[in-house]
Amino acid sequence: MLRMMPRIKPSPRLAIAFAALAILCTLSPRLYAQAQQPTTPPPDTSDSGGPGSDAGPIVVPKKKAPADEAPAPALAAPKVKAPEGMAPVTIHVEVPEVTVDIGVLLEKTHQFVPGLKPANFRVYEDGKEQKVIGFKRVEAPITALMICEFASTNYRFVYDMRNAAFTFAEQLRPQDYVALMTFDMRTQIVADFTQDKRQILEAINSLRIPGFSERNVFDALYEGLDRLSRIEGHKYIILIASGRDTFSKITLDKMLDKVKKTQDVTIFTISTGQFARLMREGRGGFEGQLQEMDYLQADNQMKTFATMTGGMFFQPRFPGELPEDFNAINSAIRSKYELIYHPLNSKQDGSFRKLQVQLVDDEGHPLQFQDEKHKPLKYELIYRNGYKARQEVE
């Protein structure tokens, strides 16, 4: 039998106590978590745009990138562009290079000496030995300008000039380029550059009646060097003249400076009128002696032009000497040794550099040649005596 318990009505105070206990149980985890936080107040980021309240740190969860999204590329290096209208600027260093053509000829026969090796050559620039980096023997067609004196003086000079010019033209080869220029008080191009030997021979044959008696050899040679400067490669000038200058605008000093600056031209000089001068020697009194001194000075000038450029100077007295002289010129022109070096003095200051070449044997002693009878043979080295360095501003 069930007994019914009487229903007890709770008092108001008890109800309030139970409610307070429930609220306390709810808030106790949050209070405990706040008690575990550091007591250092959060930084005030109100100046930088962040929250300025003291609500505590806010943890923002990291956002995961999608699997198919590629990572952001690295920042490329900044590119510097030239101002508009300005071409791109590149920096390069130019190393000077000097090429020296050397002819080695026997003094007696003017024959070229073959078979030499790079170790047989010693090259000095301003007294300092240079290291040779290139060596080869050169034998190639030539590009030459004949400059002939054609003035109304003694016909013997014209006769010698024509014989010398004919002898040179007869030894030309089909691949050679040759031009003919004459001068008295002015210059004249008789035949432009051609490979036709007959055209050159006809031009020489047309030189019969000269005009003026003045002989402006400095002006003619200066103009010839200017004309050859427009042609690439190594060139030659065959100067056939008495060497006397009577009316040039160009002075000797200016002429020598021009020869120094022209590095790719070799000058060969043939003096005319030697027989006429010998026949007149000792005659004519004081005036004749002064004229003879003028010709001696002219010979010295002609020899200087040849020596400075690595050429040769000849004074033939009779036509029979011309074939041998021009054989020597052909040997010197067509057969040479070419040496290349980087100068130790790399300054491009426009100064003149003195060159000196020596031949040595395997032990470093001066090289000597002997004939079949073991007699010593003398030889000569044909090369230009120096060059003028480039200016840095060129």
Image (tube, grey):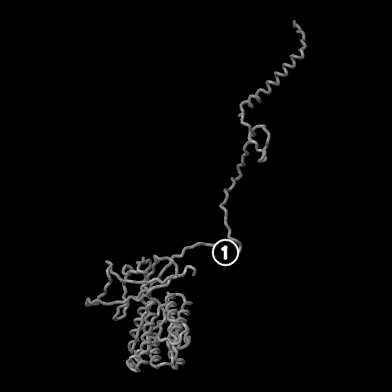
Instruction: Name the quadrant containing residue 362.
Output: bottom left
User: Residue 49, image x and y in percent?
Assistant: 67, 40
Residue located at (59% from left, 45% from top):
71
Above/below status of 388 relative to 317: above
Give the position of the N terminus as an image quadrant.
top right
Residue 9 seen: yes
The residue carrying pointer 1 sits among few (fewer than 14), some (14 to 19) or many (20 or more) residues within 10 Å by Cα, namely: few
Above/below status of 8 relative to 369: above
Q: Left or right of 250: which side holds 293?
A: left
Residue located at (58% from left, 49% from top):
75
Report the number of numbered marks: 1
Instruction: Name the quadrant containing residue 128.
Output: bottom left
User: Residue 158, image x and y in percent?
Assistant: 40, 91
Residue 199 seen: no
Q: Nearer the viewer, residue 307 or 361?
A: 307
Q: Left or right of 73: which side holds 17?
A: right
Q: Nearer the viewer, residue 329 or 218?
A: 218
Q: Nearer the viewer, residue 96 or 2?
A: 96
Residue located beneath label 1 in the image:
87
User: Residue 227, image x and y in percent?
Assistant: 48, 80
The extreme left residue here reads: 373
Residue type at mark 1?
Ala
User: Residue 388, image x and y in percent?
Assistant: 42, 72
Residue located at (33% from left, 87% from top):
321
| Local SS, label 1 | loop
The extreme top residue here reads: 1
Instruction: Name the quadrant containing residue 354.
Output: bottom left
The extreme front residue here reads: 286
Q: Nearer the viewer, residue 108 or 55?
A: 55
